[in-house]
Amino acid sequence: MQKIITIRTDKQNGLYDITSDVVSLIRDSKVKTGIVSVYARGSTAAIMIQENWDQSVQNDVISLLKKLIPPGIWEHDNQDNNGDAHLKAGLIGASETIPIIDYKPGLSTWQNIFLCEFDGPRDKREIIVTIIEDK
Amino acid sequence: MQKIITIRTDKQNGLYDITSDVVSLIRDSKVKTGIVSVYARGSTAAIMIQENWDQSVQNDVISLLKKLIPPGIWEHDNQDNNGDAHLKAGLIGASETIPIIDYKPGLSTWQNIFLCEFDGPRDKREIIVTIIEDK
Amino acid sequence: MQKIITIRTDKQNGLYDITSDVVSLIRDSKVKTGIVSVYARGSTAAIMIQENWDQSVQNDVISLLKKLIPPGIWEHDNQDNNGDAHLKAGLIGASETIPIIDYKPGLSTWQNIFLCEFDGPRDKREIIVTIIEDK
């Protein structure tokens, strides 16, 4: 089963928890065992597995990436002024593959699935979810 | 086929080679061609493909991440004092997907599969291995 | 379906666009819906999804990684003098999994698939492409 999750982002840099959407899609698929591929369709966005107890780790991810990849100093800024957003997306990566165990994603207690926005806000960010059964 | 590898970690930060476990599981699965998804179940651990000729690259990975992501300066430290561990895990990523070629992982001579521990020691770290056949 | 793409690299550090090869393999596979796993077989290479409007983002990726991971200061340099190449490969990651939508990779307009070379030039770099159908 393949579906596209669409979300709106309201910040230039931010993490958006999409776990409940992925949980619903797996339940709908009726796949008991397998994998789910979660893919950020956009070269200034990424997928990260991370804790969501509160906002602290999400804020720290944004702070770290701002420190490692400051804006305004990249060759690509002459085109779009978003060189840092592309670099953050490339470093974190567009895809994560998560096991499906007993009709649910095999996350630990503290693992959630996030879309990382690095060039928002955007009216529409697409995440492609593909569920593959292990037969 | 889906199985969970369980390992004990004895350091706060360390890489643990799980290649032989993955090789055994693929052999047991009798899958000739396909993919194997390797997933670290824990938001302060990750999976990395890396060389294992000796300890040097593993030590360098730990040194690099300590330099890029120093401990003790993160908002999340007010909760658990392990903000750096979450950031390292998010940067490296929880999953790698490796091709299966002729009943074996399609690694190069120098590629091995590692669990990266960033918040150990732990009595029990789980790695979920899912093998999908290409039919 | 599983195939190996082989390319030659002509720089020590460089990004090589392999999108058209992956597009051809998916078309040949006649798989309408599923995933494609793209894997860099070599512990000093990696796979990155990134923009290819012009050379600017590719140059910025190389500049960023050189800044974050300078050469010549790693324990592994005593073996092979390529410690930085292993660290870059580990940070970016050996694999990306991309959805297949309607016989094509589900990339956005600006997403392309690159092999990242960190220890070239090399006569032969192998990228393993495995296509899994979602039935």
Image (tube, coloured by chain):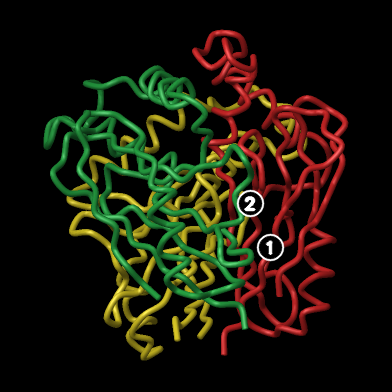
Chain colours: A green, B red, C yellow
Of residues A47 and C55, the one nearer the viewer is A47
Label disc, if present, on residue B108 of the rendered structure: 1
Q: Amino acid at mark 2?
A: Ser
Q: For the C terminus of chain C, which image quadrant?
A: bottom left
Q: How many marks?
A: 2
Quarter of the view holding residue C9: bottom left
**Few, some or many C-alpha atoms within 10 Å of disc 2 (few <14, some 14-19, many ≥20)?**
many
Asked if both marks, 2 and 1, belong to the same chain, the answer given is: no
Question: Is residue B26 found left or right of B93 in the rendered image?
Answer: right
Q: Is residue C124 visible?
A: no
- Residue B74 at x, y percent in the picture: 52, 13
**Few, some or many C-alpha atoms within 10 Å of disc 1 (few <14, some 14-19, many ≥20)?**
few
Q: Amino acid at mark 1?
A: Ser
Q: Is residue C101 visible?
A: yes
Contact, mark 2 vs mark 1 (Cβ under 8 Å): yes
Q: Secondary structure at mark 2?
A: loop
Depicted A62 relative to depicted C125: above or below: above
- Residue C22 at x, y percent in the picture: 37, 73
Quarter of the view holding residue A106: bottom right
Of residues A134 and B34, the one nearer the viewer is A134
Question: Which residue is located at x 77 percent, y 84 percent?
Answer: B30
Given the image, what chain letter belongs to the residue carrying mark 1? B
Depicted A41 relative to depicted B120: above or below: below
Question: Which residue is located at x 52 percent, y 58 percent?
Answer: A97
Question: Is residue C99 found left or right of B59 in the rendered image?
Answer: left
- Residue B135 at x, y percent in the picture: 57, 90
Residue highlighted by disc 2: C43
Cα distance in 3D space between marks 2 and 1: 8 Å
Of residues B102 and B72, the one nearer the viewer is B72
Q: Secondary structure at mark 1?
A: loop
